[in-house]
Structures are given as structure tokens and as C-alpha cells.
Amino acid sequence: MQIIAARQYISPRTRPLTPEEAETRRLSYAIKSPQAAQRDVATAALEMARLITAPCWLIPIPDRQGNTDANTRLAHLIALYAGNGAQVVKAIVRTRPIESQCERHRKRLGPIPPAQHHFQRTGKWLTARPTYFVDNVTTSGNTFKAAFNAMSFGTGLAFADAFNPNNR
């Protein structure tokens, strides 16, 4: 499956960050929260909107507890900036909580396999058009792979890509 991202995320554990990289890191964490500042979410959404083709579906990825509030907010702003019929739809749910991917990466435990994300389709009918799964950061790609497996189609759309060849 394809994953696209507006920015590259560099871990401060690898080397000192440039001011731009530090800002990417700050924004990546900030937009995870439903209470994120509007300007932070708008910055990420505008950059992400430039990567997509509308009309399209934007599917918010549930967080580790199953909540989609932060990614739904992000997806709605992406739709606003993309225009031309970009629509947000909650088409997947997490049927049970999972361990924090961020914490697993910090502890060097590796990513959670796609099958253990517990994603399930909601049953909403989607017409044929480009479909993007919306999340703040991708590391291993497994969350997007799990969403793809639940829907059988779609492209991952992240604000930042923390790709590390050792993680994928």
C-alpha cells in the first residue's frame, strides 16, 4: 500500500535537530490532541491537503483507545483546504484498545503487527473515489496497513513520516 506524508520526521535520538525538524516534531505531537491549537492543526492540514486528489474520502484513523476526535478534526480541515468534494467519513473503528505505538518505539519493542490493531469496517458504503487514511505520524506503516486490510483499499496520509528502514 502507498503512504504519503507532508514532512519527514527525524527523531532527536538520531542527531541534533534543525529548527525546522524540531517544529515538525512539535507539530506531530501537538496535532495528536483533540485540544490542539487551531493554527497547529491548520498548518498540518494545509500541507496534507496539497498531497491529495479530490474528490476523495478522508478516513480518520482511531487512536490507540479507539477515539477519532483528533484525526477527525485534522481530516475536516484537510477537506476544507482540498475542496472539490473531499469528504470525511468514519469508515473504520478499533474494536479494542492497543498499546501506544509511540511508547513501543521509545522502548525499542518494535511495531504492533497490522492484525493486532483490531480495525473493523463500520459498514458505511463508499462510492468509488480516492480514499485516504488520516493520521498524524507514520513509523512502521502498520497502522495504515491495518486500515488498508480492513477496507481492502486506500492510501495512508500522514503529516509526518518517521520511516526508519529498520522499522518497515
Image (cartoon, grey):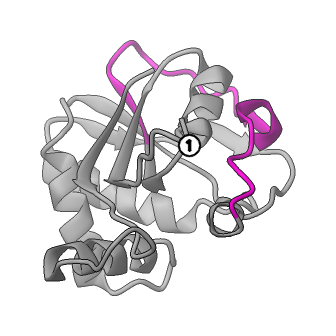
Magenta stretch contains residue 113:
yes
Q: Quarter of the image holding residue 13? A: bottom left
Q: Quarter of the image holding residue 10? A: bottom left
Residue on which disc 1 sits: 167
**Residue at image location 83% in from the left, 57% down from the top:** 97
Q: Position of residue 145 (x, y in %)?
A: 58, 30
Q: Quarter of the image holding residue 118? A: top right
Dominant secondary structure (helix, strand or loop) of the stretch shown in magenta: loop
Question: Could you say which is closer to the camera, residue 109 or residue 103?
Answer: 109
Q: Which residues are magenta?
A: 108-133
SS label for mark 1: loop
Q: Position of residue 158 (x, y in %)?
A: 37, 49
Considering the image in quadrants, where does the N terminus appear? top left
Q: Position of residue 23 (x, y in %)?
A: 24, 79
Above or below, comparing residue 23 to residue 109 in the picture? below
**Residue at image location 78% in from the left, 30% down from the top:** 115
Magenta stretch contains residue 153:
no
**Residue at image location 33% in from the left, 73% down from the top:** 15
Residue pushed farthest front?
15
Question: Could you say which is closer to the camera, residue 116 or residue 151?
Answer: 116
